[in-house]
Image (cartoon, rainbow, N blue to C red):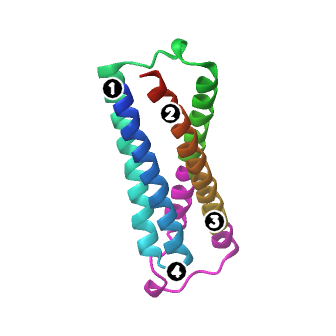
């Protein structure tokens, strides 16, 4: 059976979110290996995909409109709301991590200069890591909940 345009859009959006999660995971792996320039590239790439989704969602609303949630089974609507909460937490966590990274002016490579071992820097790095971890966990839950909602969309075809 052919896909309708909204299901096709949400399938692409799910792939995009899975890619955001993969890029974030790679970024964390790079930071753990003290490859901070690479960490920055992976994380900014993930941010770029979030930005592209927001832009595409605006276009989708203009061209295709909203989903008819009144015809959805209630369990899918509940999981959709949980998914939206996960995405909100992911975006806020990512924004906080990004803000701390830029505010602290962290060197992208240890070789670029000595780290300032101040209490403010240590606190900022901790907040950056925690916010990034929250964003990654929320992205993981977001991908899982989106897969469930998408499965429901396919079931309605």
Residue 132 belongs to the span the image colors magenta: no
Residue that carries the numbered disc 1 in the rendered image: 1
Q: Which residue occupies the foreground of this view, 127 or 57?
A: 57
Q: How many marks?
A: 4
Residue that carries the numbered disc 4 in the rendered image: 34
Residue 147 lies, in percent from the top left, at 52, 40
Residue 9 lies, in percent from the top left, at 35, 33
For marks 2 and 4, give the one nearer the viewer: 2
Q: CA distance from mark 3 to mark 4?
A: 17 Å
Question: Residue drawn 30% across and 26% down?
Answer: 2
For marks 3 and 1, give the one nearer the viewer: 1
For marks 3 and 2, give the one nearer the viewer: 2
Q: CA distance from mark 1 to mark 2?
A: 15 Å
For marks 3 and 4, give the one nearer the viewer: 4
For marks 1 and 2, give the one nearer the viewer: 1
Residue that carries the numbered disc 2 in the rendered image: 151
Task: Indicate the secondary structure of the residue bearing disc 1.
Answer: loop
Residue furthest toward the top?
70
């Amino acid at each position: 059976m052919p896909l309708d345009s909204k299901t096709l859009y949400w399938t692409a959006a799910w792939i995009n979110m899975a890619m955001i999660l993969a890029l974030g995971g790679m970024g964390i792996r790079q930071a753990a290996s003290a490859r901070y320039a690479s960490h920055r590239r992976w994380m900014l790439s993930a941010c770029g995909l979030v930005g592209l989704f927001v832009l595409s969602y605006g276009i989708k609303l203009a061209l295709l409109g909203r989903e008819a949630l009144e015809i959805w089974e209630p369990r899918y609507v509940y999981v959709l709301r949980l998914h939206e909460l996960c995405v909100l937490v992911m975006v806020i966590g990512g924004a906080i991590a990004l803000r701390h990274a830029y505010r602290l002016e962290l060197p992208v490579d240890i070789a670029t200069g000595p780290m300032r071992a101040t209490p403010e820097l240590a606190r900022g790095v901790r907040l950056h890591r925690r916010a990034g971890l929250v964003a990654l966990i929320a992205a993981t839950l977001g991908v899982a909940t989106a897969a469930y909602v998408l499965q429901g969309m396919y079931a309605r075809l």
